[in-house]
């Protein structure tokens, strides 16, 4: 199940400084005195408490070491510098845990910045908020900074989340502690709500609401995954019935299937029997699978996907990454929907290489006659680009955060006009 990591300030960056950045310390690393002063000025305008400066990576490390070992809230660094460049500095910051957040800027080939974004930050204490091309604009900078809104306060430790044991997971499944949150999928041409993705959350009795980061890896490959998924589907079916009774227009809900479950005939039998017994039309459900899950047990996966399509269910390839294998599997499988990964959507209006990959994915989907869905839509510029390229549906924080089912009707009433206005923007 997908995770959501941005704050609501991502759609309104002007809200973030007073709440999250006031009093925070930031370091600007830039060899050009003029550029360094410009960036420092932008950060002061955004209400940061203390703005430090360094001319290259070596000086930056010296500044950070003088702080006494506490990780600074943000480092904003150029990529190309004499002495220690931005790539090496990023490695040092990550390994030595000297910064909580990082933004990298450059005037060079955009593909060099892609190197930074391809680095693995999952096991690091530092979060890469993003990369920017020079000249840096204030609104683009604020948009990235909004991602750090929830992390303004340093946690005592920044180790990966503790994974629960099998007994705790089994108890949680039995007690129905896993619930679906729903993120809207909006038609780009009309601004109308067309569907939702069900995203798992754990309503933990002592730790509060937890994202899949805290449990999915521990559940993958175990018998619990089957019961977990069926439990999520039961709740989705109940919600679909409730929304119909509330007078909402017909909606589809997408649910993720794991690789093992997709290849297991017995699981598919239980899944389809559950839906048929509910009275919900199969066309109301879209099963999302990744290329990896199809390839892991190709023959069984293809067989079961064929069965699901014959019954009238939708099928979506999730996290689509343009490559020979992805295109080959997409062409041979009975998909009804192509979900383009946020890595190619977010920033596509700014990055020429992402733009090219995004367009290629959309062209493929359109040529095969399937619905195209862009994930991770966070900026108006990316929304407008998707509209120009003919993408069908969008999903992301620009439109809505994942929400409990009971909030959906209120969200529709509150945001109907805003979404229609977005759709009308050329």
Image (cartoon, helix red, strand yellow):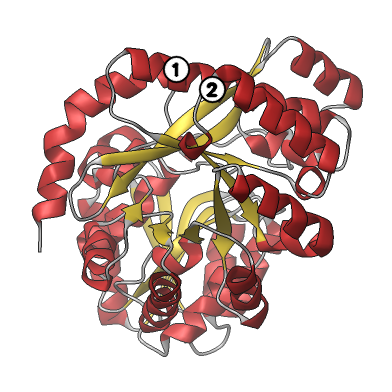
Residue 365 in the image, given as x and y percentages of width and height: 44, 70
Q: Which of the image's four quarters has the C terminus?
A: bottom left
Q: Nearer the viewer, residue 120 or 297?
A: 297
Q: Is residue 137 above or below residue 404?
A: below
Residue topped by disc 1 = 241
Residue 148 in the image, given as x and y percentages of width and height: 44, 45
Left or right: where 344 falls relative to 309: left
Residue at x 40% of width, y 43% of height: 24
Quarter residue 414 falls in: top left
Residue at x 82% of width, y 14% of height: 171
Residue topped by disc 2 = 237
Q: Which of the image's four quarters has the N terminus?
A: top right
Residue 166 in the image, given as x and y percentages of width and height: 90, 26
Q: Nearer the viewer, residue 363 or 126?
A: 363
Q: Nearer the viewer, residue 353 or 129?
A: 353
Residue 340 in the image, given as x and y percentages of width and height: 47, 63
- Residue 217 in view (yes/no): yes
Q: Are marks 1 and 2 in contact (CB under 8 Å)?
A: yes
Residue 276 numbered tag = none
The residue positioned farthest toward the front in the image shown = 310
Please tell me whether mark 1 sits on a helix, a strand or a loop: helix
Q: CA distance from mark 1 to mark 2?
A: 6 Å
Q: Nearer the viewer, residue 292 or 34?
A: 292
- Classify 10 Å Cα crowding around label 1: few (below 14), some (14-19), many (20 and above): some
Residue at x 74% of width, y 27% of height: 228
Left or right: where 13 falls relative to 252: left
């Amino acid at each position: 199940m997908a995770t959501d990591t941005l704050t609501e300030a991502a759609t309104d960056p002007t809200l973030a400084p007073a709440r999250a950045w006031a009093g925070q310390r930031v370091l600007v690393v830039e060899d050009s005195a003029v550029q360094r002063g410009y960036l420092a000025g932008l950060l002061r305008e955004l209400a940061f408490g203390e703005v430090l400066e360094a001319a290259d990576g070596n000086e930056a490390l010296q500044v950070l070491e003088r702080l006494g070992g506490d990780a600074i809230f943000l480092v904003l660094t150029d990529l190309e510098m004499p002495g220690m460049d931005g790539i090496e500095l990023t490695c040092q910051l990550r390994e030595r845990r000297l910064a909580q957040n990082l933004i990298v800027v450059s005037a060079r080939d955009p593909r060099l910045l892609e190197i930074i974004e391809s680095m693995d930050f999952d096991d690091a204490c530092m979060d890469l908020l993003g990369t920017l091309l020079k000249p840096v604009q204030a609104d683009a900078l604020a948009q990235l900074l909004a991602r750090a809104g929830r992390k303004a306060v340093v946690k005592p430790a920044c180790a990966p989340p503790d994974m629960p044991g099998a007994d705790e997971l089994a108890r949680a499944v039995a007690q129905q502690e896993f619930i679906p949150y729903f993120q809207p999928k909006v038609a780009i041409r009309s601004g109308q709500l067309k569907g939702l993705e069900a995203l798992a959350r754990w309503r933990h009795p002592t730790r509060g609401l937890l994202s899949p980061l805290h449990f999915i890896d521990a559940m993958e490959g175990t018998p619990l995954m089957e019961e977990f998924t069926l439990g999520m589907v039961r709740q989705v079916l109940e919600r679909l019935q409730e929304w119909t009774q509330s007078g909402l227009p017909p909606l589809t809900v997408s649910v993720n299937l794991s690789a093992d479950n997709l290849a297991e005939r017995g699981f598919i039998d239980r899944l389809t029997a559950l839906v048929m017994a509910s009275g919900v039309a199969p066309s109301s459900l879209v099963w999302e699978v990744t290329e990896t899950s199809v390839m892991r047990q190709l023959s069984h996966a293809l067989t079961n996907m064929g069965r699901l399509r014959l019954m009238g269910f939708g099928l979506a390839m999730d996290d689509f990454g343009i490559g020979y294998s992805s295109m080959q599997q997409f062409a041979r499988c009975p998909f009804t929907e192509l979900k383009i990964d946020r890595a190619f959507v977010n920033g596509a209006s700014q990055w020429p290489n992402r733009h090219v990959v995004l367009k290629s994915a959309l062209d493929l989907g359109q040529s095969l006659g399937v619905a195209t869905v862009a994930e991770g839509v966070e900026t108006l510029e990316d929304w407008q680009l998707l509209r120009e390229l003919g993408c069908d549906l969008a999903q992301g924080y620009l439109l809505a955060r994942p929400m409990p089912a009971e909030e959906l009707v209120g969200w529709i009433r509150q945001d109907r006009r805003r979404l229609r206005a977005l759709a009308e923007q050329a």
